[in-house]
Image (cartoon, coloured by chain):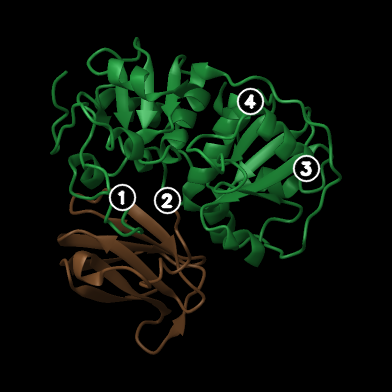
Chain colours: A green, B brown
Amino acid sequence: MSRESALVTTQWVEDNLDTPNVVLVEVDEDTAAYDKGHIKGAIKLDWTTDLQDQVRRDAISSEGFGKLLSEKGVKNDDTVVLYGGNNNWFAAYAYWYFKLYGHDDVKLMDGGRKKWELDSRELVSDEVTRQATTYTPKPADLAIRAFRDETVEAIGTKNLVDVRSPDEYAGRLMAPAHLPQEQAQRAGHIPTAANVPWSKAANDDGTFKSDDELKDIYTEAGVDWSKDTIAYCRIGERSSHTWFVLHELLGQENVKNYDGSWTEYGSLIGVPVVLGDERGEA
Amino acid sequence: MCGATEGGLSLDGIDVAKEAIIQGQVLRGGEGGEPVGNAYVRLLDRTGEFTAEVPTSASGHFRFFAGDGDWTLRTLAPKADPVDVRVAAKTGVVAEAVVAI
């Protein structure tokens, strides 16, 4: 993968609003945002209902993904362009799903909804419906998804990248600061994890920094490019953003997103946790 | 969830005594000015690192749940330069800030 194949600009999207086989998909944390205004022709995916198993805590299955995209009117050979709020956190999360289930041509709109708004580009509130399709997903590609045991085994052996804010990493905050802080699990981080907040990869307007800047950021943070990498955050969406940077923009192989992330790890019994700004030891 | 609801989450059902809340309003021209409903407010920590971001509500309001200490609010809006406002937060206290763009 590369920047050219994984990313499009807001201008590219505006120029391709009516291009056949280009499907715009908005994915927001605040699911009301789409209803108040979205890019013309964009459909919506709701990460809480569409992308999560509604009984157990898990991603939807391959079969569920196929059913979802069939209902939404997406075809296997469509070019899917994802965008959303929060600097594309949830759009990157959805992008990771599309890759998890083998969609060939998927892209992120650089800067997401914020960039589109700051550019003063048009949002509409029209209802968008697409004719249902028969979408055939592939089995989950577990080369890009990490589970908890593999994450525990990675302590001291692989790159662990904690992409939360420094205060969450150190245990001074339990959640991003736009959310209440009371949580059930313990605060802190996984021993040996480097703290590279997702936001270091983005400019203020939400667009990604240049490849050279990105390489420097992770190198300076101590990421060993010869090792496999697992990225995590709190629930797996900010780490999808970093997974996108490392795997899709920089073309780094063997990068996984640990979508259980801190809400799982910080609730486990018997695993090591480090408090404070230091990485800690294996 | 990790959601950034416009204007920040409502305080309904939240124990305010346990939170260090920073909230306020973005106004074009400052006090008495027109509320800016399409701005983005970022919360930066004492080192300038991003901690959170919310879009403002239709009335220009925003809210964060921070920790004790000093923070910076960086506001981005269409056709305006970014504006930084410093604010101190304390558990059990609601810190109010007006951002003039």
Residue A50, picture quadrant: top right
- In the image, what residue type sits under mark 2? Cys
Which quarter of the rendering shows the C terminus of chain A?
top left
Give the spatial CA distance, label 1 vs label 2: 8 Å
Q: How far apart are marks 2 and 4 (CA)?
A: 23 Å
Q: Mark 3 sits on what residue?
A: A71
Question: Which secondary structure, mark 2?
Answer: loop
First along the sequence among labels 4 and 1: 4
Outermost residue to the top: A226
Q: Are marks 2 and 4 in contact (CB under 8 Å)?
A: no
Hey, which quadrant is residue A156 in on the image? top left
| Subunit that carries the residue with mark 3 | A
- Tell me where residue A54 appears, x and y as whole percent: 56, 44
Q: Which residue sits at x=18%, y=27%? A: A272
| Whether label 4 touches label 1, CB < 8 Å | no
Say which residue label 1 marks: A175
User: Furthest residue to the front?
Assistant: A55
Dot 1 falls on a residue whose secondary structure is loop
Query: How far apart are the two marked residues, 2 and 3, measured between alpha carbons?
Result: 26 Å
Number of residues whose C-alpha sits closer than 10 Å to that of mark 3, classed few (under 14), some (14–19) or many (20 or more) = some
Task: Determine the image quadrant of residue A66.
Answer: top right
Looking at numbered disc 4 in the image, what kind of residue is underneath it?
Answer: Tyr
